[in-house]
Image (cartoon, rainbow, N blue to C red):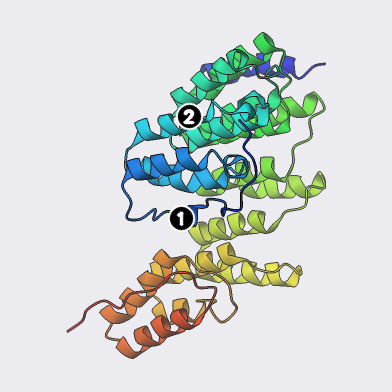
Amino acid sequence: MSSLSTVRRMRGIFAGNNKKSATKTPKPTLTSLNLTNDTPQAIVNFLKKSSKCPSFRRWRPNYEIAIHRLAKANHFSGIEEVIEHLKHYPEIRDESFVAGLIRLYGKAKMYDHARKLFDEMPQLDCPPRSVYSFNALLTSCITSERYDKIGGLFRELPEKLSIEPNLMSYNLAMKALCKVGSLDSAVLLMDEIEKHGIKPDIVTCNTLLSAFYESGLSEAENLWIMMEKKNIVPDICSHNIRLRGSIKVNGVSKALQFFEEIINKGLKPNKFIYNTMIKMYVDEGNLDQAKMWKAIDSQVLVYRAIMQRVVDGLVEHSMIENAKELVKLAKSCERFRYRLSLPLHD
């Protein structure tokens, strides 16, 4: 049975919820622009000018950083100005290029603009819209936090455009359901897609695991067991989700036990694991342990906000020398890409 039938079943689930000659001039990059101090319109002008270079406009990260800055400045008209400008280049007839623009609108939380661009694709001489651009629109829903829109997209677009949703489509739908707290519907959706030959993957399971553990539900451990039965191997992200859940329910002792299990399985803790452990001790006010777990010596990048809380806490408890030592250590570590500040003290 086609997975389009799954889409129909989901209705019930969601019902309740131009080329130029080569020159020797250097290619423009974002390093040519001061994203911190330049005005929003200066950033817009830079992007439009730089877009004349094919290699610049085809490299989406060039736009992601700048558009994030424009969104923070609430310069949404500037974002639209940049993306409208990009419609004048031949890449606009490439579905993957347009899908990237749809995602950019999503990152700026401009879902309505993303949907408008998706609808305009036939007028832009794009090939027929496929699951690729459909998933870009779903992603835009997620990043725009317009979770309520995904149900309508599944009800309307697959049948209308003869699009066959794939696993990524359903994973995004499941994420939306979890975000709005419809965990039962998310589980039903996983069961439904399995009936039609779509096997859940680690992304599917991690999405549900995170929702269950954050809600403090016992079903999280049952899902962990189910993953083993279905030969879905937990990755380091799965273990970090479970670690956070253990801390929330059982506290420090269980977290330490689970951290040892991660090591015994031969897995290498990443920055997220270390940050979870550090945050646990900071939240408890155990600054000595938080400092011990700082992971800088292990060359693991630690979130600045967490490390700054450790420094601030040390100063508040008159442990000035320890705070200075930590700030100095952070400065000496090449991979520690930010600087800690030492608060003023009496």
Can you tell which mark lies on residue 32? Answer: 1
| Callout 2 secondary element | helix
Residue 173, compared with residue 326, is above or below; it is: above
Find out whether the residues at labels 1 and 2 contact each other: C-beta distance under 8 Å.
no
Left or right: 119 with respect to 7?
left
Residue furthest to the top: 160
> Quick one: 121 or 204, which is closer to the camera?
121
Inspect the image, locate mark 1, and give the three-letter code of the amino acid beneath it.
Ser
Q: Residue at x 46, y 24 (%)?
A: 113
- Specify the quadrant that holds the C terminus: bottom left
| Residue 267 visible in this rendered orientation of the protein | yes
Residue furthest to the left: 346
The mark nearer the N terminus, 1 or 2, is 1
Q: Which residue, given by chain and number where applicable, does mark 2 sit on?
A: 85
User: Residue 47, percent across and down?
Assistant: 46, 41
| Residue 173 visible in this rendered orientation of the protein | no
> Quick one: 319 or 253, which is closer to the camera?
319
Badge 1: residue crowd in 10 Å (few <14, some 14–19, many ≥20) = few
Q: Residue at x 53, y 16 (%)?
A: 15
Can you tell which mark lies on residue 10? Answer: none
Inspect the image, locate mark 2, and give the three-letter code of the amino acid beneath it.
His
- Specify the quadrant that holds the N terminus: top right
Residue 338, compared with residue 48, is above or below; it is: below
Badge 2: residue crowd in 10 Å (few <14, some 14–19, many ≥20) = some
Q: Residue at x 39, y 47 (%)?
A: 69
User: Residue 21, percent across and down?
Assistant: 64, 40
| Callout 1 secondary element | helix
Left or right: 85 with respect to 226?
left
Residue 336, compared with residue 184, is above or below; it is: below
Res. 185 image quadrant? top right
Residue 216, compared with residue 117, is above or below; it is: below
